[in-house]
Amino acid sequence: MIQIGTSMAAPIIRSISASPDTVQPGQAVQVWIDAFDPDARTITLSGTVTDANGATATANTILTVGDPLTYELTANDPGVTIVEDPSAPGRFTVTVA
């Protein structure tokens, strides 16, 4: 059987970290999952500005275009509450009972 198309690579998690990493009951921590799409492509954008005398300046920036990632954080302790930050994918507030 011939398969046409490309296979998609799984996302890669660079790190998962908590700050602070030690808490007392009732306290909360911030947890970040840093991940990326290895199939993402980059686009170079160039901007040019010209003044009245014809002098120009050019600068570039890189734009990464990748699949949207869905983040999930779970705990093995029923006394933990996890709330995802809707404004920052991969960031969670974890409260410990």
Image (spheres, rainbow, N blue to C red):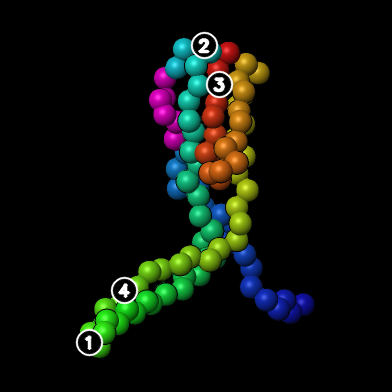
Name the residue carrying label 4. Answer: 59
Separation of marks 2 and 3 at Cα, in angstroms = 8 Å
Please tell me how many numbered marks the rendered image carries.
Answer: 4
Give the residue type at disc 3. Answer: Thr
**Which residue is at the far right?**
1
Task: Name which of mark 4 and mark 1 comes first in the sequence.
Answer: 1
Which element carries disc 4, helix, strand or loop?
strand
Check residue 92 in the rendering and tell me which mark sits there, or answer none: none
Which element carries disc 2, helix, strand or loop?
loop
Q: What stretch is highlighted in magenta?
A: 17-22
Give the residue type at disc 1. Answer: Asn
- Does 68 appear in magenta? no
Where residue 21 appears, x then y in whole percent?
42, 25
Crowd tier of the residue under label 3, counting other residues whose Cα lies within 10 Å: few below 14, some 14–19, many 20 or above:
some
Q: Is residue 71 above or below residue 49?
A: above
Task: Name which of mark 3 and mark 4 comes first in the sequence.
Answer: 4
> Of circles 1 and 3, which is in front?
1
Q: Is residue 57 left or right of residue 76?
A: left
Quarter that holds the C terminus: top right
* Residue positioned 63% across, 48% down in the render: 70
Q: In which quarter of the image is residue 1?
A: bottom right
* Residue positioned 42% across, 75% down in the render: 45
Name the residue carrying label 1. Answer: 53
Name the residue carrying label 2. Answer: 25
Separation of marks 3 and 4 at Cα, in angstroms = 44 Å
Q: Is residue 94 left or right of residue 43?
A: right
